Amino acid sequence: MQERRWRDFDWSLLIAMTLLCTVGIVALYSTNAAPGGGTEWHQKFWFKQLVWCGIGYLAFFWVSRVSFQRVFDAAPYVYAVTILLLMVVLFVGVKINGQRCWIRLGPVGTVQPSEFAKLGTILLAARILRPLGPEGVTWRQLALVLGVVLLPVGLILKQPDAGTALTFFPPIAVLIFLSGIPARWVVAAIVTGVLVGPLLFAFMLEPRLKQYQRDRINVTWNAIFHPERLQDRQTREGFGYQTLQSMIAVGSGGILGKGFRGGTQSQGGFIPEHHSDFIASVIAEEFGLVGSLGVLALLLFVILHSANVAGRSRERFAMLVLAGYMALLASHVIINFGMVVGLLPIMGIPLPLLSAGGSSLLMTFVSLGLVANVHARRFSN
């Protein structure tokens, strides 16, 4: 029995995630040489990442062996706890860069409840959508799922963290799509979105945007359609600074990169948040296009592998959970790389398994543990 358990274990997933974690830690360690912050200050990131990886592996192996019935039963409680934490963070949370998103836990550091709320929301939405009648998903199920996703999104917008709030919608959209939604509903939703979306943005969303959010959108627009405007001094030294420095780092890396600790932008400390949201720019500068494509290939393998395991699952709840996580992972990768190369506004979205951050890393390990769980039971009823 023990031999079969290890034979059915998802070794390919374990190898891929280990390689990604290793690249992330190497890139974080490389930032030690950056002046201004001091070696000790930068070492905290790679060392903490190493510690969180150890905790993450324990969580990964434990979750990979838990009965999925227990996951199904725990879904409402996981969701409730994450909602409670999102409420707590609004009152006692640590404020960083104008956002109150973290709770300090003494020597452990800070945790970000919104990262765990993503998984909690996927679990409860999958539980609601698990029963499927002959007509497909019902209006009652849709209303419940909408309420489940809007509650954490509303609390996260209060922090405020619009970027994280947006990542809740791709997995929910995938779950609803896989729940047998009638084709006419899909067509109606697309037509309504095309017609009403621009009006909603122009008359409701745009007036509510803060100035820095408008500036970030304008910087992205200029990076795509008017790159010469990025050389304007106000843009270079203002909200376009981070995007411009990241684009310089990516471009200067060339095919093979400048080598470990050889990047001028990352080592010179020119890229803000290069240890977290912009870790991909460090990888691109020091390991070049080859290194970036290698990271993308590993991330793509994890996404497609998760989709394959979900498609082969014999239990509907497990299939929905894995499909939702696959959509969440894909949205993180697309948004993060889009930010790094200037194709999307800066939204503070980490790159899974690579960016510094214990909460994101632990949530990813737990989610991948669920993938390994379903993979190991693919031949069971």
Image (cartoon, grey):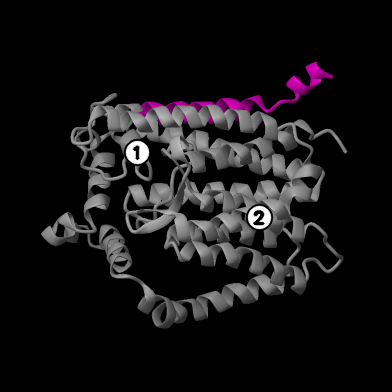
Q: Residue at 61% across / 28% down in the picture? A: 58
When the figure is inspected, residue 110 is found, relative to residue 228, above or below; the finding is above
Secondary structure category for the residue under label 1: loop
Q: Amino acid at mark 2?
A: Tyr
Count of numbered circles on the image:
2
* Quarter of the figure with the N terminus: top right
Residue 22 is inside the magenta segment = yes
Left or right position of 166 against 251: right
When the figure is inspected, residue 131 is found, relative to residue 365, above or below; the finding is below
Quarter of image, res 110: top left
- 11 and 39: which one is in front? 39
Residue at which label 2 appears: 79
Residue 167 position, x and y percent, is 52, 57
Quarter of image, res 230: bottom left
Q: Residue at 46% across / 27% down in the picture? A: 50
Find the distance from the CA under tag 1 to the CA under tag 2: 29 Å
Secondary structure category for the residue under label 2: helix
Residue 256 in sight from this viewpoint = no
* Magenta highlight range: 1-28
Residue at which label 1 appears: 275
Residue 118 in sight from this viewpoint = yes
Left or right position of 41 against 82: left
